[in-house]
Structure formats: structure tokens, C-alpha cells
Image (spheres, helix red, strand yellow):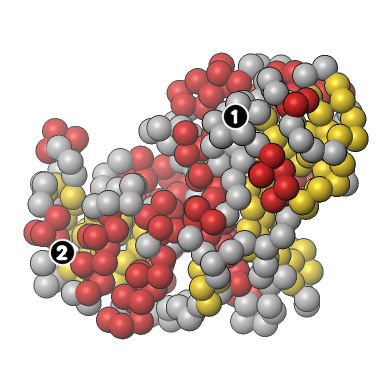
Amino acid sequence: MKIGLLGHGVVGRGVTAILDGKYPDLEITKILVKDLSEGNDPRYTLSAEEILNDPEIGMIVECMGGVQPAGSYVLQAMKQGKHAVTSNKKMLASLLEEILAASSEHHVQVRFEASCGGGIPWIHELEHIRRIDEITGFRGIMNGTTNYILSAMHENGTDFAEALKQAQKLGYAEQDPSDDIDGMDVRYKCCISLFAACGLVISPDLIPAFGIRHIHASDAAWAKQHGRVIKMIGEGSPQGACVMPRILKSNDPMSAVFSNQNRLETDSPTLGVAAFSGQGAGSLPTAHAVVQDILDIARGCTQMKTEYERIDQTGIFEGTYYISGNGAEALNLPVKEKGNGFIITEHILLNDLMQALPEGHALFIAEVCE
Ligand code: HSE
């Protein structure tokens, strides 16, 4: 089968490194790039149409990032009868319904293992578990950048800005790290996981998402003094999904996941809690997941279920919340404990917390977990 690759950045280069010359029946014949000076590869083209309209190409692999034009290219290729593999969580979460519809309507596969958990075979495992069980919940450390930052703050007392710089230098962060530190990247991954785990499609902006942009060294130090660790957690269930930093007890297995590693867990009736961990980002681990998808399609594996139910609101979340920063004490919320620059609320509804927050606040908010 001939393959058209869209994008030759961190992930795309990993795909050519793993696939080129290794599988006699698979050949990447054209690669879409933004600039021909990106490298010296005779397959490079600046024209997406040249790939999308090539009748010999039976599969496109999208590793461009961003919602558009990546989404239009994927949809156009599927409409022309080409299978699609994507690593692009933002595009997939934003256009999930259209992409699933195109897969059913045009009898082509869409696979997206690399979009969530990088190299960890997460989507495949969810699909597998669902052959027997209804998944009752999932949660995970799904973002390598924030886990790297929180780990550095916890272990070395590094401040947030310095830890972010290190994560960018190591190539974990998105080009604009806002998606990482504001929880958007995990939100997209929760959308995709909610579909794969529970067959539900929700618009990303309906998922409550809190980030770590306003965390300070004093917050990490407070958690450490209390024998706890702050982790950025995405979670979901048939009721919906939520993204939030969580102050975990040290006996929670999530608290032992350090550096840029990811860990994902599911819960279901016959399997119970199952956990998967490994590299959630990076060129070769992510490309490994992309090439697994390519091989699944080429080897005739059947498409995962594309039926879904749309939900237009997320479930009810509640908890005890740690809030720090200027103005935390002035919030109209029931307070259980007050400290130097922070409060801990009584057990409240997340919705009540969200209503109490002023627009454009600069507070750090995390759930204190039992
Ligand atoms: N920026 C993402 C992360 C890349 O840090 O996890 C992988 O999705």
C-alpha cells in the first residue's frame, strides 16, 4: 500500500525512521511539508492536493498538528476512499463527529492511537476491554510537559517558569505551551478517551479544565510537607470528563509517575483497574503508535466501533479544593482551612467553585484527594 504522509516534524520524522525500507508492502511515496528546505527528501511536496488526489495512495498519515488545514485534509482524503491515521489530538477532538461519520460513510478506517498517551497502546486497550466490559471510568497523567514541570517542582523545588523552560528545551511541550499548562491538551485527550472508552462524543469546551499556569513553588512545597504530590489528572466516565491538578496521597500509584512519563488507568467490571504507563510524548514513541495503526490497517484489522452517543454536558464533579494566589481568601466559598496565601474549601460542587471564580483570575486550583 502506498502512503501519503502529511507533516514531517517531530512525529512525522519518527514515522519515516521506523517505517522506511522495513515493510516491503508499505511505502511512503509523498510527504507534505511547509517548506522544501525542511530536508533533502525527493518525496517532499508543498501541495496537499498532489497527495489527496493521487489515486495510488490508499492511506494518509497526518502528523501536522493544529485543527486546520489538517482536519480538512483528513476529511478530504477519507471522502476519496483513503484510510487515515492521525496523531493530532486537537484536530481529532475538535472534529470527532465529522471524522467518525466520514469513516462510516466512505467505508474507510480512521485510527488515532498516538493522539492520546503517545506510544502507550491506550486506545487499542480500551477497544479491547470494551469487547467484554463496559468501562466505568478512566483517569490518567496524560501530559508529559506538566508532569515534567510538577516533578521538578516537587523533587527539586524548581520554580514553575524554570521547569517549563527545561520541558521546552527537552522537546516535550507544544510549540505554544499554553495548551499544555492550561489543561487543553489533556482536555483533547479526555475527549478522545471518552469516545474510545465509553462511546461518548462531547465538545472539548464542555469539559471543565484547570491548568498549572498559576502554580508556585510554595504550592508544591505545601503538598510535599503533607506527604502528598501534585499531579495533573484527566478523568472520565459515562457521566463525563474533567481535567484538574490533584493533590494525591503518596500511596496513590499516580504519585510515583515522574518526569515526562504518562500513566493511564481504566476500571471495568470483570477486569477491574488496569494501568498502562510509558512515554506519552517524543518522536519515536509517538511514531511507534502511528506505525502500529498503519500496520493494523494494512494487515486488515477491523475498524474500531464508530457508533457513538453525543452528550452536551459533563457530569457533576465535587471535591475539596486547594486554592492559592491573590484573592483566594475573598472567594465566596465555604472554607475548611486557611493558610499563608491559600484556602482549602469544604467539600463542594465543582460547579459552585467555577461560579465563584472571577473572570481572568490568576489562582492555582487543585482537588485535595482522599
Ligand atoms: N505536549 C504533549 C505532552 C505532547 O507534553 O504530553 C504529547 O501529546
Q: Ligand 1 closer than 8 Å to the CB at disc 1?
A: no
What residue lies at 87% left-to-right and 25% top-to-bottom? 338
Label 2 – label 1 distance at C-alpha: 45 Å
Quick check: can you spot residue 135?
Answer: yes
Query: Would you say 7 lies left or right of 238 here?
Result: left
Looking at the rendered structure, which numbered label has been put on residue 251? none
Q: Which residue is mark 1?
A: 361
* Residue 143, position as x, y percentages in the image: 56, 42
The amino acid type found where label 2 is placed reads: Leu
Q: Which residue is mark 2?
A: 52
CB within 8 Å, label 2 to label 1? no
Identified by mark 1, the residue type is His
Q: Which secondary structure lies at badge 2?
A: helix
Place of residue 208 in the rendered image (x, y in percent of width and height, measured from the top left): 60, 50
Indicate which disc, 2 or 1, sits on the residue closer to the N terminus.
2
Whether residue 16 is visible to the viewer of this picture, yes or no, is: no
Q: Nearer the viewer, mark 2 or mark 1?
A: 1
- Is residue 80 placed above or below 216 in the rendered structure? below
Counting from the top left corner in percent of width and height, residue 95 is at 37, 62
Residue at 27% x, 63% y is 74
Quadrant of residue 240 within the rendered picture: bottom right
Q: Position of residue 193 (x, y in %)?
A: 56, 62
Q: Nearer the viewer, residue 225 or 209?
A: 209
Query: In the figure, is residue 306 to the left or right of 352?
Result: left
Residue placed at 36% from the left, 59% from the top? Answer: 86
